[in-house]
Amino acid sequence: MVLKTFGWSFGVTALGLVAAVLYGGWEAFGIVAILSILEISLSFDNAVVNAGVLQKMNAFWQKIFLTIGVLIAVFGMRLVFPVVIVAISAKIGPIEAVDLALNEKDHYQELVTDAHPAIAAFGGMFLLMIFLDFVFEERDIKWLGWLERPLAKLGKIDMLSVCIALIVLLVSAMTFATQAHQHGGTHVDKAATVMLAGIAGLITYLIVGGLSSYFENKLEEEEEREHEAEEEAKKSGKKKPAILLAGQAAFFMFLYLEVLDASFSFDGVIGAFAVTNDIVLMALGLGIGAMYVRSLTVYLVRQGTLDDYVYLEHGAHYAIGALAVILMISIRYEVPEVVTGLIGVALIGWSFWSSVRRNRAIAKGGADPAEVSSGV
């Protein structure tokens, strides 16, 4: 099972490390290995959240996620995305941007760093909306009941998550503008950039997430109708084909997963510059890490881990919330990547341990699963 799920990841790791040695010797080997570990540690919460979505998709779309999805994640986000950032921010063509990345690495790194506020605002808003919609939703299983119960009640207010996200964005933009004013106004235009990028992230979430939820709900309604028809009579009339509907639902969930992965990859791509400004080594290291995140996602689905450890999804979403806040803070202040990684790992580790305690309590005393929480 492990070899079947992680086989491609092992293969890509071997090829990537060999390519690193051929490209830059053993020093490049070490850099690629470090970047791979960095990407995995920063994106473990991504795998848990992805698994929650992927388990609703059939085997065909899971394979699409591991093939086409990997190409998008590895080549799109880890290789093409940094080049596109530089091309847009520096107002140059993509070929010139590639030339900068390969031949003027220090200048290339400066341009990417200059574009960080827009990247952070876009990704921060997208991830913040995921977190807010999760905590404002009423759910049977609660991890931190003392916090989640009142938040679920507040969630009954229409558009509350959008309002909060816009307030956070406004405060972030105003904070950045204040900083610009204190430094002589050299970055005044960045405040507007932060606002526009943040709104773009919010709109992207609303469109992609809305379409995904719409088709998912239609799929569930169709399944309920088919089940009722089967109960009433063995031979019902003609039914609306469920395959096409499932395909639509799966497609938009796949699209949602890709945008989600893109948002998660922002911190990894930016953080990679703390290790190297060589775009080839970055693509190799982050690409290897992305493969493991993909394989881990499928492994969690096939093993039913989220069903056995019910608080993992909660911990991952709290890690998403923490990452969103960190991204918005990083518009003005530098946040070490180790802090981002440790917060995510700590929250997921805590939720895993809470799940283990819950399972033990149920097994020992036959407690009602809905009543067993983290104990906090």
Image (spheres, rainbow, N blue to C red):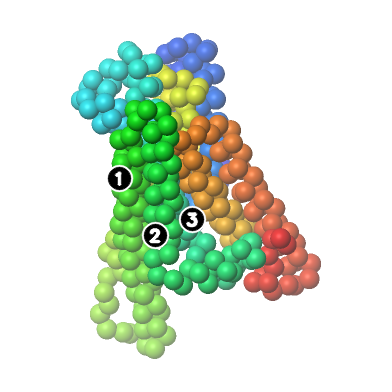
Residue 101 picture location, percent across and down: 33, 19
The numbered dot on residue 196 is 1
Q: CA distance from mark 2 to mark 1?
A: 15 Å
Depicted 152 relative to depicted 278: above or below: below
Residue 147 visible to the viewer: yes
Q: Residue furthest left?
A: 93
Decide: marks 2, 1 in contact (CB < 8 A)? no
Quadrant housing residue 77 = top left
The residue under label 2 is 162
- Give the number of the mark in front: 3 or 1: 1
Quadrant housing residue 248 = bottom left
Q: Secondary structure at mark 1?
A: helix
- What residue is rendered at 48% in x and 68% in y? 155
**Dividing the image into 4 quarters, which one contains the C terminus?**
bottom right
- What residue is rendered at 29% in x and 66% in y? 245
Residue 246 visible to the viewer: no
The numbered dot on residue 131 is 3
Residue type indicated by callout 1? Leu
